[in-house]
Amino acid sequence: MFRTSGGLRGVDNAAMAKTFRPYDPDQLLLMPPALADWVPEDHLARFVSDVVDTLDLTAMEEAYPEERGYPPYHPRMMVKVLLYGYCTGVYSSRKLARQLTDSVAFRFLAAGNQPDFRTVSEFRKRHGAALAGLFQQVLRLCRQAGLVKLGQVAVDGTKVKANASKHKAMSYGRMQQTEAALVAEVAELLRRAEAADRDEDARYGAEQRGEELPAELARRESRLAKIREAKAALEAEARARAQVAGQPPGLAS
């Protein structure tokens, strides 16, 4: 149905008097929002943030030379975003960049920063070996803390319950197997990320996000005009169908 000056066609006028909760998309917040207030205390994103804060990123940070110009994004932030993304099944750099706009958890981890997909992809490529080592450290910490899974990622490649793995000593052979499974798990995460970026580069083009709106729909003024034009055309079609079917125009939808 389409909205007209007389309300919604086919809707009882009595229904228009129903009261709903306030809805104002343009409402301003009286106080500046704190992203942390929107993320539950037991959220996985908080755990990832706390774990990454314990890691030594000196080597990664020193890979950036002192130079003039706009500074790069902080490696610690980028590591948190990548790790959380991979652990929740988001491998594509384009999808990660989209989450930095759409997801409260990602925005919390990035502290509001929004690197584009090319920046995310280049960071992964530049620090691939270092990321593998850092991710392995994180999974070892999780295993030691008694976790079996970090998001969707198995910490030790087994289905052993957390309380058993925490309180029962492992044999040397079992430790070697577990370590090998952990390394393989991390390698698979990075492989999926690389494959996702490669496939999407081929599909959309290396410089395209893949979700760009057409030029006439990108700006709000022209977008609203296009929507009104499309709506008018659909209403005209509905009236024509009603006329052919011998129905009163007001019943068309």
Image (spheres, rainbow, N blue to C red):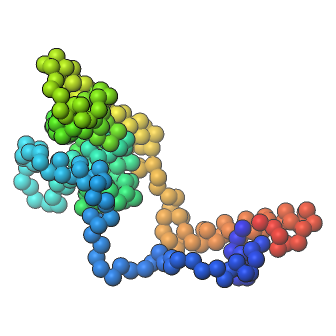
| Residue in the picture at 38% in, 37% down | 196
Q: Is residue 62 above or below residue 177?
A: below
| Residue in the picture at 64% in, 72% down | 228
Q: Is residue 227 left or right of residue 220?
A: right
| Residue in the picture at 27% in, 58% down | 41
Q: Is residue 193 left or right of residue 236?
A: left
- 60 or 89: nearer the viewer: 89
Q: x, y percentage for residue 207?
A: 37, 48
Count of numbered labels shown in the rendering: 0
| Residue in the picture at 45% in, 44% down | 204
- 156 or 220: nearer the viewer: 156
- Can residue 185 be seen? no
- Quadrant containing the C terminus is bottom right
Q: x, y percentage for residue 198?
A: 37, 36
- Can residue 44 be seen? yes
- Quadrant containing the N terminus is bottom right
Q: x, y percentage for residue 44?
A: 29, 50
Q: Is residue 214 above or below residue 85?
A: below
Q: Quadrant of residue 56?
A: top left
Q: Quadrant of residue 194?
A: top left
Q: x, y percentage for residue 112?
A: 27, 63
